[in-house]
Image (spheres, rainbow, N blue to C red):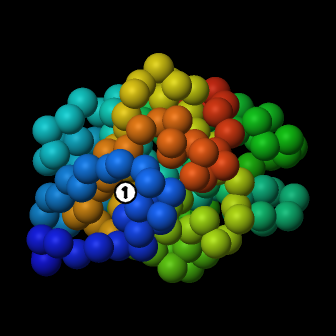
Amino acid sequence: MAKNKKLNSMRLLEQHNIPYEVLTYEPITRDASEVSELIGLPEFMVYKTLVVQSMATDKPMLTLIAADRQLDLKAMAAAAGEKKVRMASHADAEKLTGLQVGGISPLMLTNKNWPVYLDQPASGLEHIVLSAGERGTQVRVGVTSLMQVLGARLAEISRES
């Protein structure tokens, strides 16, 4: 992988004058817990992006939760004002986003105007790490700045794994 490869997610952060740090690893995994090990950060700082769909409309939404947490579908539905939601299958997530599972990033999908939900525990952190839009590349970014650029809503949408 080219060391200085600039992704659209990084360009977006730069357009908004948001400082970020690029963290790279061999793109051998798509599991956020394994990624946290590879980049040497605790799981509670490494956030995974999950694609969730409304059961009523199939409308996609993005959720960001820490690697050591599990999405609570009932809590997510409540946060989104939906009766029920479901996780998109890996194939559907890739088809909807145009990105590989393990490399899905809300920073690459701002043009889709999908609702983005950031799990509540992130509010207690200064920075989180999330995918930059491809396997093997993560960005560390300030939580407040990230929420602003994504228009993300803070919600309690997870439980312990």
Q: Where 158 sits versus 132, above or below?
A: above
Check the image and name the residue furthest to the top: 124
Q: Secondary structure at mark 1?
A: strand
Question: In the visual, does 100 lie left or right of 145?
Answer: left
Task: Examine the rendering and report whether any part of residue 29 can be seen.
Answer: no
Residue receiving disc 1: 131
- For badge 1, the amino acid type reads Ser
Query: What residue sits 71% from the left and 65% below the top?
Result: 113
Place of residue 42 in the rendered image (x, y in percent of width and height, measured from the top left) = 24, 30
Graded by Cα atoms within 10 Å as few (under 14), some (14 to 19) or many (20 or more), the crowding at tag 1 reads: many
Nearest the viewer among 10 and 66 is: 10
Q: Where 72 sits versus 89, above or below?
A: above
Nearest the viewer among 112 and 65 is: 112
Q: Where 119 sits versus 115, above or below?
A: above
Question: In the visual, does 80 lie left or right of 50?
Answer: right
Q: Quadrant of residue 8?
A: bottom left
